[in-house]
Amino acid sequence: MNRSHFCCQIALTSLVLWYVPAWAADEAGKTPIDRGTVTEATGGTLYHLGPGDEIRVQQPNAEELDGKVARIDDMGFATLPLVGKLQLGGLTVEQAQSLISSRLSDLLLKPEPIVSIAEYRSQPVSVVGAVNTPGVIQLQGRKTLMEMLSLAGGLRPDAGGQVEITREVTYGRVPAGKEATDPSGKFSTAKIEVAKILNGDNPSDNIVIFPHDVISIPRAELIYVTGEVHKPGGFPLTTNSAVSVLQAISLAEGLGPQASAKNAKIFRPRGDGSEKQEIPVNVAGILAGKASDVTLMPRDILFIPDSMSKKAGVRAAEAAIQTVTGVVIWRR
């Protein structure tokens, strides 16, 4: 082996040892490397191979190797014809290509292998909740929170105003929103206001996503409008802005022809949800500008009786809601 070949092998071995895969560090009981720092040092754009990833090698003058696919195992190794078993976990595609070329130099005059990723499996991100296509998405390069939500098909109409991100602390703590560490100290969780990112009020919250992050989008709280309106049902509170009685009636496409608007009621759950507070509201007076509009709270029922049932109580309102929406709202 000539001196230049030996130096190349030493340099590549040092690189592998420096970027010890997290799975190896964890099993050894040592403190894992801050993988967030590694990503920042590389500009956040290079993909590092890991367990489950599959690579394809093209080497035209080596039939045994050309077009072959190899899977990286849980310890970061992959086995290929001619070159044998290699530690590829933690390397970029370019570094893996250089290592394979070095191994082939003993067999081929001018090895020029081309390495590509056949399948991404080592950097999963889970996107769950109120998105159109929830599931596991494999990171391919640098992706931000909004890019991941877009890859998940975007937010559903009933999505809430916050996104919750859970991250392994080996990647660093989530640098945005209301962040806290769980009691085990292994996970960092933060809640981020989506509207502020979309509106440009807080673009710094559009953070870079790391492998194994869990992005959860809860459904929005609902208000309900039932009774003598054109479109009774539940309506999501998609932002932090309050919804008033007039706005709720607008969402329900207006009052019906038999509405007894001055006898409307709001049914509001108390603390434990077992009882409901009944709040009279004069919708007719609000519409005429003679009474102040009323702000609705999450899970409120705005009940507009007709002229025949203007004295209907909470049970009638509950029955109407269940008929329209198909849900039992007080015990969901």
Image (cartoon, grey):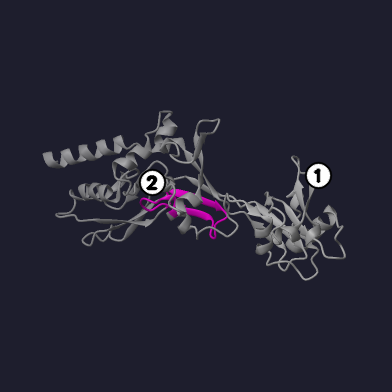
The residue to which callout 1 is attached is 275
Q: Residue at x 71, y 61 (%)?
A: 288
Q: Residue at x 20, y 47 (%)?
A: 102
Q: Picture quarter containing residue 36?
A: top left
The residue to which callout 2 is attached is 50
Residue 21 placed where, x, y %? 37, 38
Q: Which residues are magenta?
A: 121-146
Quick one: SS at disc 1?
loop
Residue 326 visible from this viewpoint? no
Residue farthest toward the top in the current orientation of the protein: 30
Q: Is residue 76 left or right of residue 157?
A: left
- Relative to 177, say whether 302 is above or below: below
Q: Residue at x 58, y 60 (%)?
A: 157
Q: Amino acid at mark 2?
A: Gly
Q: Residue at x 28, y 48 (%)?
A: 96
Quick one: 179 or 290, which is closer to the camera? 290
Q: Is residue 96 left or right of residue 125?
A: left
Q: Amino acid at mark 1?
A: Glu
